[in-house]
Image (tube, rainbow, N blue to C red):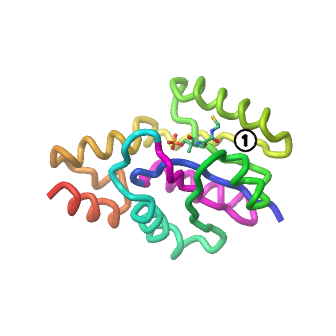
Amino acid sequence: MKIAIYPGSFDPVTNGHIDIIFRASAMVDKLIIGVLSNVKKQPLLTVEERIALLEATTHKYLKNVEVEAFSGLLVDFAAKKNASIIVRGLRAMSDFEYELQMAQTNRNLNKNIETIFLATNVHYSFLSSSVVKEIAMFGGDINSLVPPVVEEYLKTKFM
Ligand code: PNS
């Protein structure tokens, strides 16, 4: 059984993440979305809120996707879940240096786990959770950037 982890902060999940989740889930038997609970920066949403929004946007459509919080090292979480693949989305060259370092670090920590990169849909190459939060904070339109449930939820946060 091929199991992959798609890790991230997901503060909040965006349409860019959703695109990667749909494509990655079609490549494996099980995709576990790993939500980092000990985020370095102060997150807007609690880990429970981030998980609930991910579940609301994926569970109905994708039967082989699970969402789970993790803390500590990603490779340890992956090993505990019997996952042999880490999936990351690449938006632009600016992502590449950090992603390469992370993939090489993880490979150094555990040789049994491979990182694969999916090229982000060109429509979302500018998109990040930070951009979404900034637009939402100032009352801008995030309708095309996040799933409807996330849009509604962020409204309650900034009203
Ligand atoms: O969506 P993000 O915030 O870019 O995701 C970053 C994430 C969660 C993948 C990364 O911070 C992570 O794996 N953290 C866990 C700690 C870890 O394993 N560090 C060693 C690899 S650099």
| Frontmost residue, 2 versus 75 | 75
- Quadrant showing the C terminus: bottom left
Q: Is residue 130 left or right of residue 142?
A: right
Q: Is residue 67 left or right of residue 110?
A: left
- Residue at image position (66%, 40%) is 117
Q: x%, y% of residue 68?
A: 58, 63
Look at the numbered disc 1 and give the secondary structure of its residue: strand
Q: x%, y% of residue 14?
A: 42, 52
Instruction: Decide: few, some or many residues near mark 1? Use Cα within 10 Å; few <14, some 14-19, many ≥20.
Output: some
Ligand 1: image quarter: top right
Q: Which residue is mark 1?
A: 115
14 vs 64: above or below: above
- Residue at image position (60%, 23%) is 97
Q: Is residue 29 left or right of residue 94?
A: right
Amino acid under label 1?
Thr
- Quadrant showing the N terminus: bottom right
The question of residue 25 being in magenta is answered with: yes
- Residue at image position (26%, 64%) is 152
- Disc tally is 1
Q: x%, y% of residue 48?
A: 43, 65
- Residue at image position (55%, 60%) is 69
| Frontmost residue, 121 versus 33 | 33
CB of residue at label 1: within 8 Å of ligand 1?
no
Q: x%, y% of residue 104?
A: 73, 30
Q: Which residues are magenta?
A: 13-39
The question of residue 110 being in magenta is answered with: no
